[in-house]
Image (cartoon, rainbow, N blue to C red):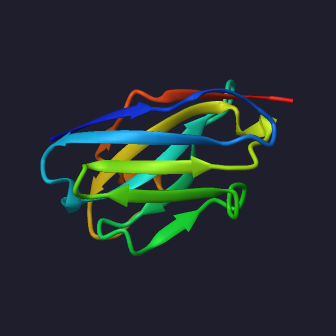
């Protein structure tokens, strides 16, 4: 069992930056590969980024590639999402997720645990 708590969301103007954090507790954090997903109003939840448990391998949705960076600190049980050049279409609730695997995934169904989410709003 692992518990996930996201933080760092807020209101930002287009072109601005935010860094989301996800704190994990429970089982050994380095057993898990991690992902970030988001859900905009009236839309389905979608994949944003994933990182494997060692932190070596990352993968991004095309819509955020080059603007967002996922990283992790296994010593602190933390995963981060640095978001730059934000656009109004990035407005969503952002969720952190964990899966017991050496590899990340862009499939929601691959994840075992989810946080409650943090709201990101980008104004134009």
Q: Which residue is at 80% across, 43% downward? A: 15
Q: Position of residue 101 (x, y in %)?
A: 26, 64
Number of disc labels: 0
Q: Nearer the viewer, residue 75 or 90?
A: 75
Asked if residue 9 shows in the view, the reply is: yes
Is residue 120 left or right of 110 when viewed as pictured? Answer: right
Q: Which residue is at 28% across, 70% downward? A: 102
Q: Position of residue 14 (x, y in %)?
A: 81, 37
Asked if residue 45 shows in the view, the reply is: no
Is residue 25 left or right of 90 when viewed as pictured? Answer: left
Say if 65 sits above or below 116 in the image. below
Residue that extends furthest to the right in the rendered view of this protein: 124
Q: Nearer the viewer, residue 44 or 24?
A: 24
Q: Position of residue 124 (x, y in %)?
A: 87, 30
Q: Quadrant of residue 69?
A: bottom right
Q: Which residue is at 77% across, 38% downward? A: 89
- Which quadrant would the N terminus be assigned to in this image? top left
Is residue 111 left or right of 15 when viewed as pictured? Answer: left
Q: Position of residue 59 (x, y in %)?
A: 53, 67
Q: Quadrant of residue 44?
A: top right
Say if 116 sits above or below 77 in the image. above
Q: Nearer the viewer, residue 67 or 96?
A: 67
Q: Which residue is at 41% across, 33% downward? A: 6
């Amino acid at each position: 069992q692992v518990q996930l708590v996201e933080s760092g969301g807020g209101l930002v103007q287009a072109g601005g930056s935010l860094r989301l954090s996800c704190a994990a507790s429970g089982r050994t954090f380095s057993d898990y590969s991690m992902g970030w997903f988001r859900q905009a109003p009236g839309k389905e939840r979608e994949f944003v980024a994933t990182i494997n448990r060692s932190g070596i391998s990352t993968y991004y949705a095309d819509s955020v590639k080059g603007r967002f960076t996922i990283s992790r600190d296994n010593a602190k049980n933390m995963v981060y999402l640095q978001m730059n050049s934000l656009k109004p279409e990035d407005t969503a609730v952002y969720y952190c997720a964990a899966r017991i695997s050496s590899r990340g995934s862009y499939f929601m169904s691959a994840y075992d645990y989810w946080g409650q989410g943090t709201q990101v709003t980008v104004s134009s």
